[in-house]
Amino acid sequence: MIALIRKEYATQCDSRWLSRICCKIIENGHYISCDASTQKYLLEVVNKEGSTWEKELICRSKPFDFSKEEQRYMTTISLETFDKEQCDALFGERSILLLENSVYEWNVYKHIVDTYKRDRKHPNLIKKLSNAIDNRRLIYYHGGGWSQHQQHIEQHEVDTYKSVGKYKICALLDSDCPSENDIPKEKYKLYCYLCGDKYEDFTGYDSSKIYTLNQPNYIWHMWYKRSIENYFPNDSYISAGMDPSLITETGTQRDYVKITYKNIIGYDKDKLQVLAHTMSRQKYEDNLKHFNVNGEDLSEIQLFLLKLVRII
């Protein structure tokens, strides 16, 4: 994230708190956006109020230097928009990827991040995302199924994020579609909650609120195919020692088959991590839907990873 600090706001802050929040921003891998006069003032405040370690931290780090790419894709937050507790949560608390089944899925997504570190589109951003995972600034949370996601998010808002969870949480859902865009009606209420829509006025899913980086409320993603299992081609199942001969290899039908041990012999949820290790970036890219996002062509996984960049 990028913390925007204006001189007028900075000079009105308690200097001890301002020194502490600046060091917290830097320590947790965030940036500070300000003009030269404000930068000088912040350095003076930390030099006056900070510990020896904090003074060294702000001198050896480069919190004021970020690229245009980082400015475009990372979330910029003006400190003066929030109270002190919220600022502490925004720049001090870890970010969360809320998963339906974290026990089996988290290592898959960690592997995807690692696989995409040399992605041609945004390698520096993906490396930053990888560092956030390695340093545990981005962690997973077991949502226990999409039906419990809202409850978990609301609890985090109260306990940890002080009503700013929309900047720190990314929810990831299976679509569970038996055919394209045929999303189960049971998910309508959660969709409305995540998008900030009124459930009473719901008329149907708007994909422009899902497959975008400009989401109206929470940052979240729903796999376009039925579930993460549908993103692995048959040769990956074979490489992992499973038999997919009962399931079709190509076509949209393949994207919406419910994959179980019944149609892929030897498959079990605990094999997901093994499947991921058979995949390369190109193998993922060869079988992904693309979206036009702010004039840029992005594959679905590229889009998902940039959503994670927005919360770190």
Image: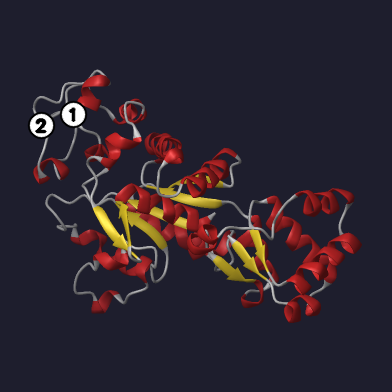
- The residue under the point 34% across, 36% down is 281
What separation in Å lies between label 1 and label 2 (alpha carbons)?
8 Å
Residue 247 is labelled as 2
Q: Is residue 113 visible?
A: no
Looking at the picture, how far across and down is residue 242, in whole percent? Answer: 21, 21
- The residue under the point 10% across, 24% down is 245
Q: How many marks?
A: 2
Q: Is residue 188 above or below residue 118?
A: below
Mark 1 near mark 2, Cβ–Cβ under 8 Å?
yes
Looking at the picture, how far across and down is residue 260, in whole percent? Answer: 19, 33
Q: Is residue 257 visible?
A: yes
Taking depth in this image into account, of 141 and 147 the one nearest to the observer is 141
Mark 1 residue type: Asn
- The residue under the point 70% across, 76% down is 6
Looking at the picture, how far across and down is residue 282, in whole percent? Answer: 30, 36
Q: Secondary structure at mark 1?
A: helix
Taking depth in this image into account, of 175 and 45 the one nearest to the observer is 45
> Who comes first in sequence, dot 1 or dot 2?
1
Q: Nearer the viewer, mark 1 or mark 2?
A: 1
Identify the residue position indicated by label 1 in the image: 234
Q: Secondary structure at mark 2?
A: loop
Mark 2 residue type: Ile
Q: Is residue 242 above or below residue 18?
A: above
Quarter-of-image position of residue 231 = top left
Image quarter (top left, top right, bottom left or bottom right) of the N terminus: bottom right
